[in-house]
Each structure stands twice: as structure tokens, then as C-alpha cells.
Amino acid sequence: MAHEKKETSLIIFKPDTLQRGLLGEMIHRFERKGLKIVGLKMIQLEDAILEEHYSHIKEKPFFGGIKKYMKATPVVVLAITGINAITAIRTVVGPTKGHEAPAGTIRGDFSMSGQSNIVHASDSKESAEAELKRFFKEGELFDYERPNFPFIYADEAF
């Protein structure tokens, strides 16, 4: 794979994903796109990690509701890699507000909300790096070969 274009990003499957029994469908969409899972685990979020992750909104009046929602059940976090993965993931996920997201995207197909919107996805290389460090410890991400990548990425893989 062309290393200068290879990116790794964080996905959080929120409580509504688990409560609605959508986890398998969500993972399938990323794999079907051609992205590679390099990390996966279920965790229970605590106040400290939520305050760090949502530091940009923790002073907003609605943050208490988001914190309560994100702690309602465990979440599943994924590290996904691929060429231009961040853009590809954001395309698969769709806009934040489910009622505005186009059909065919995760949020467009499964969400009507801005909060209960199935999934969080890193929005840039910088946030992906910080978020991956926040949710995965050293040794929890794996690199392995997928023999189908030349067929997914064509000339970009070489």
C-alpha cells in the first residue's frame, strides 16, 4: 500500500449501535468499502475519557446529556486503516445529523438524531492520531497483509 496515503482512523460505535443490534452491519460496511480493521475492543466509557474526547464541547449545556448517553452501555471502538481512510470513512458515515444524512450512509440509513447517530469517526489526521492514542494502548493495533488490497486500490497500492 502507498504509505504516504495510508491513514488510520478511530471509529466509536455508540450505545445506540449496540442497543439496536447494528454492530455487525456497521463493521460490514467498512470492510465492504475495502478498509482494514487493525484494532477492535468493547469498553465502558468513564467521565475522564469523555471529558477529554469531547473537550471542545464540555462547557456546553448539552454535554451532560451526551455524557449520560455515551455511558449508557459499553461502546465498541475500532481502528481502521487504508489509503485515504479518513475521507472514505467520513463518506461511509455521512453528516452528523442523521436526518440530514443522505441515504446509503450509515447515519442516513440508521439515524434521525444528532446525538444518537450510531457512530463517531475522526474528522482529520490530527484528531485520528490523538483519538487512537486515547482509546488504544501500545500493542493493541495490528498490522497484517490483506491479499485483496491490489484489487481494491488498483495502481494506488503500488
Image (tube, grey):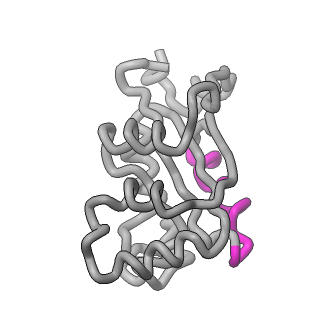
Residue 29 is one of the magenta-drawn residues: yes
Q: How many marks?
A: 0
In this picture, residue 31 sits left or right of residue 8: right
Nearer the observer, 102 or 89: 89
Quadrant hosting residue 20: bottom right
Residue 103 is one of the magenta-drawn residues: no
Residue 96 pos. (x, y %) = 37, 70
Where 106 sits versus 110, above or below?
Answer: above
Residue 128 pos. (x, y %) = 39, 42
Where 59 sits versus 39, above or below?
Answer: below
* Residues in magenta, as a range: 19-33
Residue 32 pos. (x, y %) = 63, 48
Where 71 sits versus 111, above or below?
Answer: above
Residue 112 pos. (x, y %) = 47, 84
The residue positioned 34% from the left and 51% from the top of the image is 123
Q: Specify the farthest residue to the front.
A: 48
Q: Specify the farthest residue to the top.
A: 158
Q: What type of secondary structure mainly makes up the magenta span?
A: helix
Nearer the observer, 101 or 120: 120
Quadrant hosting residue 110: bottom right
Quadrant hosting residue 39: top right
Nearer the observer, 82 or 116: 116
The residue positioned 41% from the left and 56% from the top of the image is 91
The residue positioned 66% from the left and 64% from the top of the image is 74
The residue positioned 49% from the left and 46% from the top of the image is 10
